[in-house]
Image: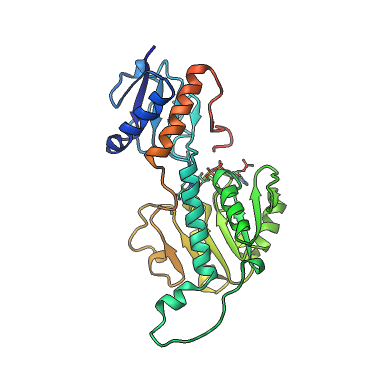
Amino acid sequence: MTVNVLFAATESRWAEYEPPLRKEIAALGIEAHIATDIPADQVDYIVYAPNSEVQDFTTFTRAKAVLNLWAGVEAIVGNPTLHLPLCRMVDPALTQGMVEWVTGHILRLHLGMDAHINAPAGTWDPVAPPLSFDTRVTVLGLGELGAACATALAGLGFQVTGWSRSPKDIAGITCLSGDAGLEDALAVADYCVLLLPKTPATENTLNAPALALMPKGARILNPGRGPLVDDEALLDALDNGHIDHATLDVFRIEPLPSDHPYWSHPRVTVTPHIASETRAAYSSKTIAENIRRGEAGEPFLHLVDRTAGY
Ligand code: NAP
C-alpha cells in the first residue's frame, strides 16, 4: 500500500528535501507518495517545521504522526489541535554540528585566541593559556546534544559537570539534577553551556541569582534557546565584570534586532542561530525510519513528552 507523506516543512525547503526523502524512504522498502499538496484526510505522515502553513491538525483524520525537522518543539508542542504523536529531530549530523560549535567557541575563549588574532604586528607577550585539566565546564541539559557536548569536552580534558531534570549517569561527567543540583553546577561553571529546551520550567534559568552563583569571570555559551537567559541580568553581569563573556546563538527575537545591546557589547559574541542546522541528507534518514516504524506498528523514535514540553 502506498503511504502518503505530506511535506509541510515549508515550500522553500522542498527542493532540498525531496531527493533525500525519496531516497531514504525507498531504501527502507516503503512505497510512498511524497508531496507538498496531499488532501489532509489522505495524509499518513506530516513532515513539519515550526514556520509551516499547517497550524490546524484537526483535518488530518488518518495521519499517524507529525515528524518535526527541528530538535526544539516549543512552537508546536502546545498546539491545541495536535493530538497526533509528535517526534522531534535527532540525527548524528545535528549532534556533531552542536559539538563542533560548542567545543570551538569554548576553545576560542579558553586559549585566548582573539588576543593573538587582533594583536598588532610585533606583539610578543608569551603568556601560555590555561590547560583544560584546570578548567571547569558546566552543561545545562544532558539530552542528545548536551550529553554529546559534555562527553566531547571531557575528552578534551575539561572537568565537566552536567545538569538535567532526571538523574543521569554519564561516564566522565559529574551529573547533577534538581534545584540543589543547579546551584552546585553553577558554582563550578568557569564555562556554562545552555542546552535546555524552551519550556515554562526552563525560562530564565540563567537569571540574576543564578548568574551570581557562577565564579567571577565565568563565560556563558547559549546555543539552546534565547528565553533560557534573562537578558537584562546577563548584560548587568557583563557590565559589572562578574561574567567575562557571552557567546550567544539564540535570542528571544530572531533575527536579533539591530539596536539590541548584544550587538555592540565588547564581550558578547553573536552568532545567527547557526550552532547546529538540520541537514536534509541526514535528517531524512530519521524521518524515513520513523515512517518505517509507524508502518510496522513499532514505537516511534524521539517522541515528544507533551506534558514536559520537550
Ligand atoms: P533533549 O534531548 O530533549 O534534551 C534536553 C535536556 O534538557 C535533557 O537532559 C532534559 O532533562 C533537560 N531538561 C529539560 N527540562 C529541564 C528542567 N526543567 N530542568 C533541568 N533539565 C531539564 O534535547 P536536545 O536534542 O539535546 O536539544 C536541546 C535544545 O537545543 C533544543 O530543545 C533546542 O532548543 C536547542 N537546539 C538549538 C540548535 C541551534 O542551532 N542553536 C540546534 C538544535 C537544538 P532529562 O534528560 O531529565 O529529560
Residue 114 vertical position relative to residue 278 in the rendered view, above or below: below
At which x and y percent is residue 69? 42, 37
Q: Would residue 207 be visible to someone looking at this image?
A: no
Q: Residue at x 34, y 27 (%)?
A: 22
> In this rendering, does residue 260 appear at all?
yes
Q: How is the image coloured?
A: rainbow
Q: Position of residue 1 (x, y in %)?
A: 39, 11
- State the count of labels: 0
Q: Quadrant of the C terminus?
A: top right
Res. 256 image quadrant: bottom left
Q: Is residue 210 above or below residue 110?
A: above
In depth, the one of 229 and 232 nearer the eye is 229
Q: Residue 281 is drawn in which quadrant?
A: top left
Q: Quadrant of ligand 1?
A: top right
**Which one is nearer the viewer's eye here, 50 or 301?**
301
For residue 71, side relative to residue 242 (left or right): left
Percent coordinates x, y for residue 103 in the rendering:
52, 59
Of 65 and 281, the residue lying toward us: 281
Nearer to the camera, 117 or 43: 117
Which residue lies at the image location 45% right of the left edge and 67% below the top edge? 268
Q: Residue furthest top?
A: 1
Is 144 displayed left or right of 292 in the figure?
right
Residue 147 at x, y percent in the picture: 60, 48
